[in-house]
Image: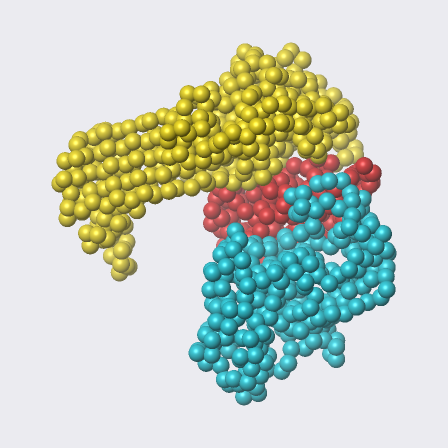
Amino acid sequence: MMKHPIRLKVNGSFHDLSVEPRDTLLKALREGLGMIGTKKGCDVGDCGACTVLLDGKPVNACLVLAVEVEGKEITTIEGVAQDGRLHPLQEAFLEYGAVQCGFCTPGMILSAKALFDENPDPSKDEIKRSIAGNLCRCTGYVKIIEAIQAAAACIDSSRPHQKKTRGLR
Amino acid sequence: MKAFDYFSPGTVDEACDLLLRHGERASVLAGGTDLLVRMKYGEASPDYIIDLKKIPGLSEIEYLEDRGLRVGALASIHALESSPIIKKQYSPLAEAASVLGSLQIRNRGTVGGNLCHASPAADMAPPLMALDSTVTMAGKGGERMVKADDFFVGPERTLLKTGEILTEIRIPDMAPYSKGIYLKHGVRKGVSCSVVSVAVILTMEARRPLCMNAKIVMGAVAPKPIHAHEAEQFLEGKKIDLTLLREAANLAAEESRPVDDLRGSAWYRKEIVKTLVQRGIAEILGWVH
Amino acid sequence: MRVKGNIVQRATRDRTAIKDPRVQIPNEFESPNNQIRNKPVGHGKLELVSPVIWRLEIGAFAAQYEAKEMSEKLILESLKEEPNFSKVGRSVQRIDGLGKVTGKAAYASDLQRPGMLHGKYLRSSHAHARVLRIDSSRALSLNGVRTVLTAKDVPGRNRYGLALLDQPVLAEDRVRYVGDPVALVAAEEEEIAEEALGLIDVEYEELPAVFSPADALGEGAPQVHEGGNLVLHFKIRKGDVEKGFEEADVVVENTYKTHRVYHAYLETEAGLGEFDREGNLSLWSGTQYPIRTRRQVAQALGISENRVRVVQAALGGAFGGKDDLTVEIGIALLALKTGNPVKMVWSRRESMEAHTKRVPMTIHYKSGAKKDGRLTAIEVVIHGDLGPYASIGHFVVKKAVTLCTGPYFVPHVKADGYAVYTNNPRSGAMRGFGAVQAAVAYESQIDILAEKLSISPLEIRKINALDVGSSTGTGQILQHSVGIKATLERLSEYVDERGMRV
């Protein structure tokens, strides 16, 4: 089978890979680049465990072919923490007990991060809608939503004109 | 998935060429949220995949004062959901876009893909039909335009011929004093395939009480999305009250031809048609929120 | 992970960490549940096979390890601040949390090893059939396929099972459910293994099958196993139910059916197995029970237990579904035969079709009560559908029988549970383990009694609630910590405060 050489931009860095057309972005990330943070839950776009950001927008990596996304910005969970510092979402998930088995966590964090980039002060309903495509079998979602709310408030606090700081706890 | 060769043509002509050349062995790739799923289940195994996304000009959403709305077939569902002009002037379309799949699916799935896959439950079909849209199919011989109403032939079958692709959808302005809604009933609120869906658009007379025109299009209750013609005609020229509301809903339910499947029985779906039609009309008229 | 430049540096740093995991943790803070991931046996020299694989290997083990180290350091730091070094009653961050929020935690399905092959099961498409012939020649000639195994290739015992050795590793003469493993394939790539499955020719002779416990226990029913279809009959007797029902003012009798439920863990069954040069097996898997798994794997392979090491990888959910063995024996066999590390990850469909689900039960429940709401007697018959292999499903039925009174005092009890083989898909452990199925019945019964006696559902439960000193359905006298009455009292207050109607 003919392989295509492609160049993927993942978390700000370029990676050269040789892929078959049928290789999904999920496979390219996990097996081609060894970036195992993006998970395979159902492989058909139902569970959201494979959520990555494509040019800032959450998509199911299992339904994207690697050959389709040359030149696009791909963000995975590995790219969320910056300069060794956890993103408020990551801290909040830890602090609020929003992580149990943790398999849905990367996808949840990316979906929430994309939400914040578009809407820094989301309502609870908006948060719920943003993670509607991410299934969790362990937590029952309540703590995940609380964690996202807390992270939103925390990020908010860095903007002086926004509402009062609540802090993370 | 079975292995395949991948092409990403740069023009509509190239794409149509490839499709003609490979015929049954080729599939069009837009968002991939339908095709790749079917391929993974072994329900589709094309030898050639023609990716349309490198063709410029197919994903714009453009409003022209005298011509109405032009939506490129490759516009993502999310683009439709969040487009200010669609939310303001073609609200049932934005509503339908907002309840399709998950955000991840909406960011990749395209309106053209939704129409061409032609599931009887396709979310984009009822509002586009209710809005009297026209779709453009491009092939080697040129372009053909058909009404969205006529585009669907049967379950997963459309008027598209081999070698043709859908390029755009044109939607005329809604008539003055018109309001529409899209209601979807699924096994749960989000990320579910419709059990029944309904798009309703009412055009009222300048002074409210009389309904000048009604469009009621139902999804997932027939081999393809269908107008409830009798219900539509029944409401025209009438002052809508509760009795009329129920009567129209009953007519719509009678016109529906649902089957039993794993998401619901035919009987149940007819009941839901009644509910959704009533609810849709009531909401448009401001009786409920 | 960066491709260029840092590889050698990174390798050196990680190699140190790998060699002596305990070097940075002071002894007095070692907790009995210290979860430092073990390193693969024979890992001493990390060979540079290729830049890509090198990176994968480090990524899978060391990075996750590194995250765990960081996490433990943080926790140890905070421990030092506490005057009593006590975390009891406090909210603590998970010890494995950091790896999970950064994407570094390595789950069974994430693991990679140099030279790794992919394993897959060929599964029966019949509920009950004789296996006449298996021809793997076409599959073996597919480029990239390393081996195809059938029952004759099982070196040890071709039988396993957590309680009863009733399950073949690979089908010998018969298949007993749709999904029963018939053959194993190892190939260089997952897609090749998948393709190979379609090239294995199996000739079946269909046999009559049985699909309900009632049918399975009936006269002339097809036998799922030689010993008959009844796995376990468990009963409890307390007092005299005849007398109890005579004393009753009202008797309610119903049949409840609970269905199969899928755990739907977000990570499917997965694992990786590798033999070292001395013939010791290391097996990483998403298992709930490494010790038990180890024993079964050793016996299937015919090697001694101390040559098998099972490491529980991070699990993407289990809920009882990974209690039983899943991929472990399969990957061990393939690793043994090929000499390569072998990984197996079940597809979602495979997980749904082939593995154990909540035991479906039919519960016939007869309750007697006096006018004032007090239960006098219950008579219960439970049939549990185990599928063709018991797993620990019969214990689930046992538990349902044991708990069939619910948290209520019943003076006279007659309960019988039958765990039965069928040719349905498999059943086994799922969170609740019989308690859930029983609750469907006893809670419905008490609600119906309440309605019949015109007593509120809350009141009737208060009347019958167990307390210290009560005897349970099995005759145990409760001595401590019986919270149901207090809970119901509190609930009553809550309801009254809000003017709710119950």
In the displayed orientation, state which residue is furthest to the front: C220
Q: Nearer the viewer, residue B120 or B34?
A: B120
Q: Nearer the viewer, residue B121 or B95?
A: B121
Left or right: residue C309 versus residue B79 is: left
Supply the letter of whichever chain is red. Answer: A
Vertical order, C433 against A49 (above or below): above
Vertical order, C36 against C256 (above or below): above
Res. C147 in view: yes
Quadrant for the N terminus of chain C, please.
top right
Q: Position of residue B52 (x, y in %)?
A: 78, 55
Q: Quadrant of residue C25?
A: top right
Supply the letter of whichever chain is yellow. Answer: C
Res. C328 in view: no
Supply the letter of whichever chain is cyan. Answer: B
Q: Position of residue B218 (x, y in %)?
A: 57, 66
What residue lies at 32% left-to-right and 31% top-to-bottom?
C417
Vertical order, A90 against C310 (above or below): below
Quadrant for the C terminus of chain C, please.
bottom left
